Image (cartoon, rainbow, N blue to C red):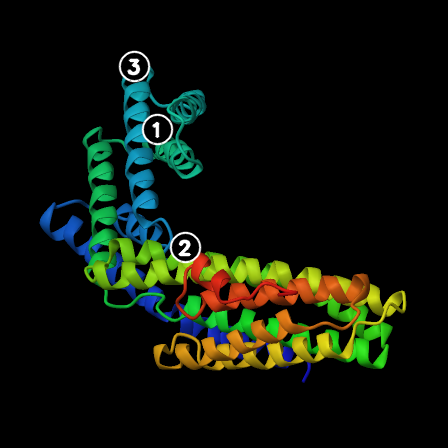
Amino acid sequence: MSSGGRVLPERVRRLGRTAPLLVQSALAAGIAYWFAEAVLGHQQPFFAPAAAIIGLGASYRQRWRRTAEIVVGVAIGVGVGDLVVALVGPSVWVLVLAVLVAMSLAVLLDAGALIVMQAGVQAAIVTTLVADPDQGLDRWLDAVVGGGTALLIAFLSPVGPLRRPREHAVEVLRTLASLLRDSVTANLTLDTTLARRTLQRARETEYSLTRLREATEERSDAAALSVLRRTRSRRARLDADAAVVLDLAVRNARVLVRRADVAVEREDPIPDDVLRLVQDLAGVVDHLAAGYDDASQQASLRLELVALAERSSALSVPLGLSGATVLAQTRSLVTDLLRLTGLDAAEALGLVPRMYR
């Protein structure tokens, strides 16, 4: 399939993932505009829907902060603009002065980038478009209406990024299994090209981990605002813990893959028993991916990992440097993956027997 053929389906899937957010933003914009016009009596309150859309944003992350920054930024810009116009009168130089003062004040208040930008924009609007001084207060009220609407929609919405952290976690697990399997194949066939390619793929896993971290953070932010906070917060904490464990697992896997590449390049053979252990671990990782988030499978997955841990502790063949490194990382991976079955770090470590008993 051509790159163009792959791009369109991915964009359609992305639209499907963001559709709930787009609907929320559209509804918030309409409600905010109606309230500011019909209830407050403001003429063309365009900033009410704008504030609502910005407050909800294209993601669930930091909605409280975005909304607060919009309201504060508008307050600073409107206040400075009105004051400067009242003292000096409208002109190009007044525009320059108002924008400079408003943005400088926001910076002095240690405000975020959005507050600084909004302060400057609102100062510019007040000094150029707002002839009636009372409209400055209207604009600030419109921002409050838009921000409040955004938070209300976020609070009441039953839709959240419920699946995204899990989808990314499964993607990381499948990649991990593939890396382990390819490393074994490269060593069995002494394929240096495959070994180097696998190492490069291992280095590129940081992108998948970043997406996983972002998804878990977004999930946490959505849970913090949701009316279903208690249920979602617990699930969000579990997702965040799993993301930390997967990060550790991938880092251990990178070391394993790097040493497996060195073993092929330097013809430092890894014992077949160790390679079979890694191959079988890849199979267990596939099972973890297939049964991820399925509590009914945790016990059987834990038994598979414990069996691998016991095998790893009983190996007595001569290892060499590469073999010893790969075995050590395999045992570390088993410990990490045991934590995905619901164990804490101490419990997982306790199920991996010491070597050379």
- Identify the mark at residue 217; answer none if there is no mark: 2
| Residue 110 % position (x, y) | 40, 27
Q: Secondary structure at mark 3?
A: helix
Quadrant of the rendered image containing residue 65: top left
**Amino acid type for the residue under numbered disc 3:** Leu
* Residue plotted at (45% across, 57% down): 346
- Label 3 vs label 2, nearer the camera: 2
Circles 1 and 3 in contact, beta carbons < 8 Å: no
Q: Residue at x 86, y 72 (%)?
A: 192
Q: Earlier in the sequence, mark 1 or mark 2?
A: 1
Circle 1 sits on which residue?
127
The CA distance from mark 1 to mark 3 is 12 Å
- Within 10 angstroms of label 1, few (less than 14), some, or many (20 or more) residues? many
For label 2, the crowd category at 10 Å Cα-Cα, with few meaning under 14, some 14 to 19 and many 20 or more, is many
Read off the residue under disc 3.
87
Q: Are marks 1 and 2 in contact (CB under 8 Å)?
A: no
Residue 241 lies, in percent from the top left, at 42, 58
Identify the residue shown where x is 29% and y is 40%. 68
In the image, farthest residue toward the left: 39
Measure how far apart labels 1 and 2 are at the Cα level.
39 Å
Q: Verify CB contact (< 8 Å) between mark 3 and mark 2.
A: no
Query: Which residue is at the front of the view, 78 or 222?
Result: 222
Q: Is residue 188 left or right of residue 160?
A: right
Q: Is residue 270 visible?
A: yes
Image: 289 above or below 140: below
